[in-house]
Amino acid sequence: MADDDSADASNRLDEHARAWVRKLSSGAATRKDARLLAQWCARSAGNREAFERAKREWQAIEGVAQAHRRLFPEASVASARTAGHRIASVDMRRRGLLGAGVVAAAAAAAVVHPPLALWPSWSELAADYRTGTGEQATVALAAEVELTLNTQTSLAVQGGGPTGGGERIRLVAGEAIVRRGSGAPHVELLAGDARIVPGVGDVAVRRQGERYCVSCIEGRAEVRHPVRTIALRDGEQLWFGARDMAPVAQADMGQTQAWRRGELVFRATPLSEAVQEINRYRSGRVVLASDALAGRRLSGHFRISALDEAIAQIEALFEARATRWPGGIVVLA
């Protein structure tokens, strides 16, 4: 009887942990949610272990999504996103998380709004080229056209341009550099509603939320945006959103290309932005639970391979309190 009671208590704990994951998977997780979850995990080792199990279960769903992609390679990023939204309302409480009952629909629902961005979204999984956390990759796309993908980057190849020649590549997430040689075919990078046409040289394109940044590292590039078309020269940078374009500015190339040297460089960067950048390279998640901390400014050079050193420096510089729990999640308050 005692064993039955123990099993029931364990099952209830697992259901509680799964409820936390479902709550966060709504896509609207707040700092308050992160604080409450951190408090729940801190109450006991059993709570922490249950949450770690629940997170692993949800991460296992990524494997189902990847299998779906292998079985249906013709599915585009757009159709995958549409399918994901169509089934996002499935009641996961009724389906459970593991076992033979887990289906591809449940997998898609899980990756539409990943809790705290702990794993890739559906559109990222469905991309043609993708790097995981801390990974970088180089792809020879065509003769004298090379793509360098930074961490957590997804690119979708959408076929020829308006004249039927060359390549069109959509930046789904992350950051990539396109190197185009003198004999390369026409190439276009799609970033939101804009088209970036690189000349001979290197052009970097980055997505941050719903805004994009284009940096002309070498050569020339043309940004064709619904607002207007702008030509960029060596060392120039441009940020834009769906309906606006910032003025062209000089890029800090030492900072822009630091990731290629295995570094992150911050120059009086608001801590909220610095933490977002750290999260792109580090497994798990760093969460700022303090509005006061968010506006503090961080400067320094940090090795991508040892970003826990950056967290330790944040603790020391700003007298922040770090709560660490399973899965590499750190809450700073």
Image: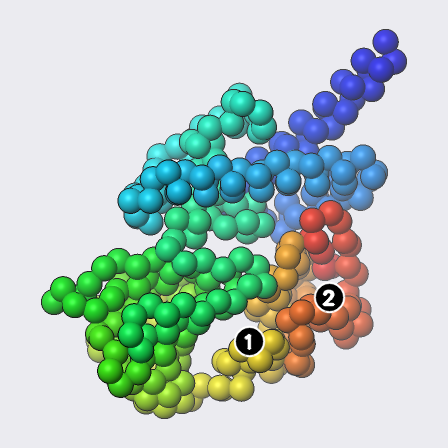
* Badge 2 density bin: few <14, some 14–19, many ≥20, Cα 10 Å: some
Q: Look at 76% across and 38% down and name the residue there.
A: 49
x, y percent for residue 4: 81, 13
Q: For marks 1 and 2, give the CA distance.
A: 17 Å
Which residue is at the front of the view, 150 or 312? 150
Q: Work out whether residue 21 or residue 175 is closer to the camera in this orientation and state it.
A: 175
Question: In the figure, is residue 150 to the left or right of 238?
Answer: right
Q: In which quarter of the image is the C terminus?
A: bottom right
| Residue located at (29% from left, 44% from top) | 74
**Residue 109 in sight:** no
Q: What residue sits 39% from the left and 43% below the top?
A: 69
In the displayed structure, 157 sits above or below 64; it is: below
Q: Quadrant of residue 168?
A: bottom left
**1 vs 2, front mark:** 1
Amino acid found under the numbered disc labelled 2: Asp
Residue extending farthest top: 1
Label annotation for residue 127:
none
Would residue 110 appear left or right of 48 to someone viewing this image? left
On the image, the x and y values in percent for residue 324 come to 76, 53
Instruction: Please state which amino acid type lies under the numbered disc 1.
Output: Trp
Element type where label 1 sits in the image:
helix
Which quadrant of the figure contains the N terminus? top right
Name the spot of residue 170 as percent of width and height, x first.
32, 62
Which label sits on residue 259? 1
Q: Which of these two is toward me, 277 or 305?
A: 305
Q: Is residue 121 left or right of residue 301?
A: left
Q: Can residue 179 be seen in this view?
A: yes
Reading the chain from its start, which is encountered first: label 1 or label 2? 1
Residue 308 bears which disc, if any? 2
* Badge 1: residue crowd in 10 Å (few <14, some 14–19, many ≥20): some
Residue most extreme to the left: 163
